[in-house]
Image: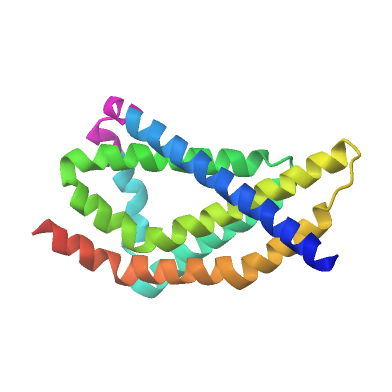
Amino acid sequence: MFRRNRSSGFSSLTTSFIFAIILFLTSLALGMGLASDVSASMVEELRPLLKPAAELSSPGLLLLIFLNNAVKTLVVILLGVFLGLPPFVFVTFNGFLLGLLIQGLAPATGYAMVTAGLAPHGVIEIPMLLLATGLGLLIGKESLKWLIRRDSRVKLELSRALRIYYQWILVGLFVAALIEVFVTPHLVHLTEG
């Protein structure tokens, strides 16, 4: 009995995670498709916002990136109780924005530099963000069940989500931040030449 419930929870998380991936990829493609209307000047306008972060020392930048992503993912999980709407908005907005940035930067810098700037840490960071989104969506589904007075496991799912957050997501985000601060800049530099 316990095993069946556990596999059912696993199946629900898998479904929510796959749904988060589909939302992300769809919004990423949409952002890339609409990026032709976005000029490289938009990217230049964002530079002043990034300047304070660029002036931080490596440990300071590492802490900033890690805390930013750690707080975002925790909020996405917790706000899942609002019927999953915040995680839905989070993943679609971030996918769309990433698509715009990729297509906005690629003509000026080349796809090799964009890939070098995103892929090394992105292969860990993006799945962690999608896992947090999937957990938030699952909590949202259970909240909806509670709202319509059906059998709901919202507290159980929230507890499990927080356990996954502390055991897996935080670790993954820290590794991704390390790569972003100490590896990604060197790979970007290699593609400049």
The N terminus, quarter of image: bottom right
User: To which quarter of the image does residue 135 belong?
Assistant: bottom right
Residue 73 percent location from the top left of the image: 58, 56
Q: Up-down: is 146 above or below 168? A: above
Q: Residue at x 40, y 60 (%)?
A: 123
Q: Up-down: is 184 above or below 48? A: below
Residue 56 percent location from the top left of the image: 35, 66
Q: Which residues are magenta?
A: 34-44
Q: Residue at x 86, y 38 (%)?
A: 147
The C terminus, quarter of image: bottom left
- Lateral position of residue 173 relative to residue 149, left or right: left
Q: Up-down: is 135 above or below 20? A: below
- The residue positioned farthest toward the top in the image shown: 37
Residue 187 can be seen in this image:
yes
Q: Up-down: is 184 above or below 31? A: below
User: To which quarter of the image does residue 105 belong?
Assistant: top left
Front residue of 168 and 46? 168
Q: Main secondary structure of the magenta part?
A: helix
- Lateral position of residue 190 relative to residue 35, left or right: left
Q: Is residue 71 magenta?
A: no
Front residue of 117 and 29? 29
User: To which quarter of the image does residue 55 belong?
Assistant: bottom left
Q: Residue at x 36, y 39 (%)?
A: 99
